[in-house]
């Protein structure tokens, strides 16, 4: 079974631009979560989607948004990029019903200049 | 509030056992996880334990959970140089898919 796939692996953007990251979950998984990893703040939860609905949200500004499609693939968008948005963005998938572990992808490394 | 703490660094000799410790604060944690991260990579799920269990063993890995003290440990037997990585402890709150992560323990295995 293929794992969680995130594209692209690397991105370089300029302050003020917007960016869209993509995540394809493990086949059959309906929950997709997004996390931000930075050296200063560590791993922080952004949001979680299940069946195209946001089920949980972390403490990030409204510039960070996401969505999920009917095939469970998810995208996250960051608008008006700031230097502090430079991070590794990790996506995780899970079956989504009942307690079950999260499986992570290799992440998208975003650099904002 | 929700908080997970880990020591920052551990160095062991190849062939020895490694023990990585973690403490958490939320008593409503349902799952506790250990993830491994190698340079430039994402998080690899190593093992996880239900909060109603005391111990779980999986090949070279042993997880111990002391729910009274909110203490979790990961023991790696016969540690190899390939085990050098950052290890993250995480808890899930109220059966949700929101994980609270510790800051990670960097394990260095010396030949």
Image: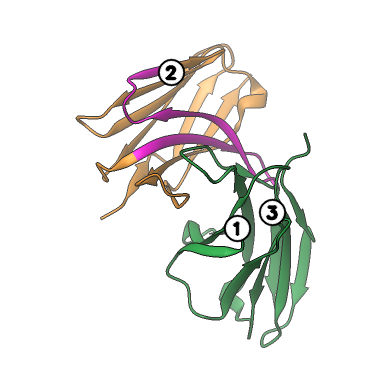
Expressed as whole percent of the image width and height from the top left, the position of residue A82 reads: 60, 81
Chain of the residue displaying label 3: A
The residue at 72%/72% (across/down) is A20
Part of the protein shown in magenta: B30-56
Viewport quadrant of the N terminus of chain B: bottom left
Chain A colour in the picture? green
| Residue A9 in the figure: left or right of residue B48 | right
Return the residue at label 2: B56
**Mark 2 to mark 1 CA distance (whole Å):** 32 Å
Q: Nearer the viewer, residue A74 or B86?
A: A74
- Tell me which chain appears orange: B
> Number of numbered discs present?
3
Front label number (3 vs 1) = 1
> Mark 2 and 1 residues: CB-CB less than 8 Å, in contact?
no
Using the image, tell me which numbered label, if any, was put on residue B78.
none
Return the residue at label 1: A51
**Mark 3 to mark 1 CA distance (whole Å):** 22 Å
Residue B34, magenta (yes or no): yes
- Per the image, label 2 sits on a secondary structure element best described as strand
| Residue A25 in the figure: left or right of residue A9 | left
> Mark 3 and 1 residues: CB-CB less than 8 Å, in contact?
no
The residue at 74%/40% (across/down) is A3
Q: Main secondary structure of the magenta part?
A: strand
Q: Nearer the viewer, residue A59 or B52?
A: B52
First in sequence, mark 3 or 1: give its number. 1
- Per the image, label 3 sits on a secondary structure element best described as loop
Above or below — where is A58 with respect to B108?
Answer: below
Q: Are both tags, 3 and 1, on one chain?
A: yes
Return the residue at label 3: A107
Neighbourhood count class around disc 3 (C-alpha, 10 Å): few under 14, some 14–19, many 20 upward: many
């Amino acid at each position: 079974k293929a794992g969680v796939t995130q594209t692209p692996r690397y991105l370089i953007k300029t302050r003020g631009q917007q960016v869209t990251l993509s995540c394809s979950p493990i086949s059959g998984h309906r929950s997709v979560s997004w996390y931000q990893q930075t050296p200063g703040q560590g791993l922080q939860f952004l949001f979680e989607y299940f069946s195209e609905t946001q089920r949980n949200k972390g403490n990030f500004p409204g510039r960070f948004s996401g969505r999920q499609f009917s095939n469970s693939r998810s995208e996250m968008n960051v608008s008006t990029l700031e230097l502090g948005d430079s991070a590794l963005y990790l996506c995780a998938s899970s079956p989504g019903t009942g307690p079950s572990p999260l499986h992570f992808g290799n992440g998208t490394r975003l650099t904002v200049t | 509030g929700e908080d997970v703490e880990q020591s920052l660094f551990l160095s062991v000799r190849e062939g020895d056992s490694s023990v990585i410790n973690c403490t958490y604060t939320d008593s409503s944690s349902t799952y506790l996880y250990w993830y491994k991260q190698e340079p430039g990579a994402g998080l690899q799920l190593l093992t996880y334990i239900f909060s109603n269990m005391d111990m779980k063993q999986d090949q070279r890995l042993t997880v111990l959970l002391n729910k009274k003290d909110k203490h979790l440990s990961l023991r790696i037997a016969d540690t190899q140089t390939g085990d050098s990585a950052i290890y993250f402890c995480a808890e899930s709150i109220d059966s949700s898919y929101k994980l609270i992560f510790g800051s990670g323990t960097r394990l260095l295995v010396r030949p």
